[in-house]
Image (cartoon, rainbow, N blue to C red):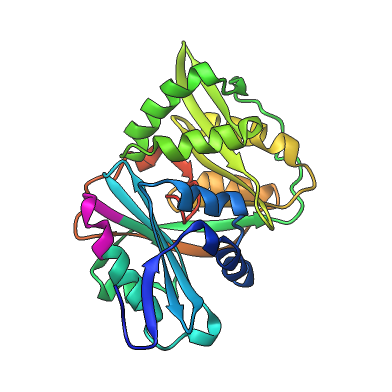
Amino acid sequence: MSGNSDVSIRPMNINDLKRAMELSYLEGWNQTERDWRLLIENPLNICIVAEQNNLVAGTATGLNHSNEVGWIGMVIVDKTCRGQGVGKMLLTSMIELLSVVRSVKLDATPAGEPLYRKLGFTEERLIYRMTNPSSGNPGKDSSGFESIKIEPESLPTILNLDRELFGADRAYLIRTLFESYPGKAFMIRNNGKPEGYVFGRDGIRFNHIGPLFAFSPDAARSLFIKASESLFNKPVVLDVLDDKTNFTTWLESAGFVKQRYFIRMYLNNNYYPGQAQYQYLIAGPEFG
């Protein structure tokens, strides 16, 4: 595919990794090389670049959740190439390439929202980005729950539950998070059944906690406290669903501050809304 005479769109490959890392770092984003590899190396995913004068001028990724949901992320255009329609070229190409999936979704920044609306996206909800530059102790866990490490034999149960709650099968993402960061994955059992679970990952600037699903606010707080134990005095970032007001207030009491927000959007039809009432933290705007 190609755009104007100066810019062309082509598939991203592993040789573009260094440039992709450079672009996300210059934006102040948190992605690591491992994050980029997760996106590029899965053959089901669709990752593209905009190339201008033999230089990668922009990127966009489409995380394919089992041909059910295509999740658009990492839409970056080099600052020197903005205002030339490169972002629109990337997005229209990505939408065309994701025609193999039933639903297309993304978490937009306020700056990107107008373009997404012009392309047919509709708002679903807001998600707040919260950070703590030096995470402290969020308090004693008085919930009565016990958060335990997720063991490999428990992962299939978590994957089945995640499909039900997230709304689509994203086993590749969850399995990769678990295999990459097993010490950041915890769950709660209640009467032998999962009451909630949380995963985490490293970042260039912050440690990221999420996704976090729980069937009760007490379970959500218990999981968060457990996930925070190894992050004392370390920078932490979270993406919290807007309806979790009590959870957000509790996080603020623990030193977290709202920085900005994302707008979760879907194209045409929202076939996979999931059960958002049980979702507290997302995996990140690039993952869903």
For the N terminus, the image quarter is bottom left
Taking 242 as reference, is 230 left or right? right
**Residue 97 is a magenta residue:** yes
Residue 258 percent location from the top left of the image: 59, 60
Residue 171 percent location from the top left of the image: 40, 34
Give the residue displayed 43% in from the left and 46% down from the top.
Answer: 42
Is 185 drawn above or below residue 68 in the view shown? Answer: above
- Give the mark count: 0
In the rendered image, which quarter is residue 94 located in?
A: bottom left
**Furthest residue to the top?**
191
In the rendered image, which quarter is residue 272 located in?
A: top left
Give the residue displayed 50% in from the left and 16% down from the top.
Answer: 153
Question: Foreground residue, 216 or 180?
Answer: 180
In the image, the segment drawn in magenta is 96-104
Question: Foreground residue, 140 or 210?
Answer: 210
Question: Foreground residue, 237 or 143?
Answer: 237
Residue 178 percent location from the top left of the image: 55, 33
Q: Say if residue 270 shows up in the picture.
A: no
**Residue 169 is a magenta residue:** no
Taking 50 as reference, is 115 left or right? left
Is 21 drawn above or below residue 143 in the view shown? Answer: below
Give the residue displayed 36% in from the left and 26% down from the top.
Answer: 160
Is 75 drawn above or below residue 276 in the view shown? Answer: below
Residue 205 percent location from the top left of the image: 69, 58
Q: Say if residue 205 shows up in the picture.
A: yes
Give the residue displayed 27% in from the left and 60% down from the top.
Answer: 97
Question: Foreground residue, 173 or 109?
Answer: 173
**Furthest residue to the right?**
233
